[in-house]
Image (cartoon, rainbow, N blue to C red):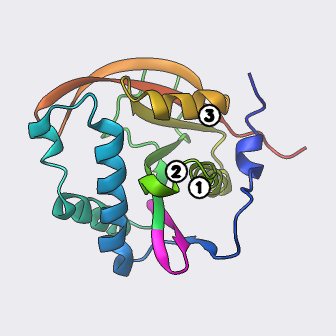
Amino acid sequence: MENQARMLSVVPDWASTYHVREAKLDDVVAMASVTRSSWLKAFQSFLPDPVLKQGTQQHFEQLWRTILLNAPEEEAIIIEDEGEVVACGACGMYRFDYNPPLGDIIKPNAGELYRGYVTPVYQGYGLGRSLLARRLAMLAARGCSDVYTWVYEDNSSARGFFEHLGASIIGIRHGKTMGSHWFREVCYRVKIDKPA
């Protein structure tokens, strides 16, 4: 397994036009657009059309607005290309009221990664890794050493992403997406190595 510390230090070979910053309420519409396009591309092969149709622009705007209004408990960041939002993601302490604790595996000071999206035409250029690295650094600053994320079992792209970077599977659960469609979800753990 690869050293997971590299997740904190990955810096893509970007043009100088890329900029990473904390998200603001003014970014909600752009973040929802990124989310929707990425969500549809990633999930259209295994989620039924009625479920996909629920992933509207308005749905994702409300989702991001809720996250941003819950600061500082939840944090969100964006990546811009010449002022255009092309990636976004959120993190915070593990949401025990939203996800199962999986027995004794998840510790009380655990962090969680969620809502990581990159506009499809920008995928494959390292933005996802930078989005991950920045969020892990934010959680490390909160004192987290164990970070978790839930991924659809059928989302081979996201699973490959985390497994390539050394994340380990710690559990699987059944859940519902959009309140109606049953699915299986895999929980990954990322260990944040403390500086020597």
Q: Which residue is mark 1?
A: 127
Looking at the image, which residue is at 28% across and 63% down?
Answer: 66
Q: Is 162 placed above or below 79 here?
A: above
Q: Is residue 36 left or right of residue 159?
A: left
Q: 39 or 110: which is nearer to us?
A: 39
Pair 2/1: label in front: 2
Q: Which residues are magenta?
A: 74-85
Looking at the image, which residue is at 53% across and 72% down?
Answer: 80
Mark 3 neighbour density, 10 Å: few (under 14) some (14–19) many (20 or more) = many
Where is residue 178? Give x, y as percent: 16, 41
Mark 2 neighbour density, 10 Å: few (under 14) some (14–19) many (20 or more) = some
Q: Which residue is mark 3?
A: 190
- Label 2 amino acid? Gln
Q: CA distance from mark 2 to mark 1?
A: 7 Å
Q: CA distance from mark 1 to mark 3?
A: 18 Å
Q: Are marks 2 and 1 in contact (CB under 8 Å)?
A: yes
Question: Does residue 103 appear anywhere in the picture?
Answer: no
Looking at the image, which residue is at 17% across and 64% down?
Answer: 58
Q: Quadrant of residue 81?
A: bottom right
Where is residue 141? Give x, y as percent: 67, 57
Where is residue 14? Give x, y as percent: 70, 64
Q: Which residue is mark 2?
A: 123
Pair 2/3: label in front: 2
Q: Is 43 placed above or below 35 here?
A: above
Where is residue 138? Give x, y as percent: 62, 58
Element assignment for label 2: loop
- Label 1 amino acid? Leu
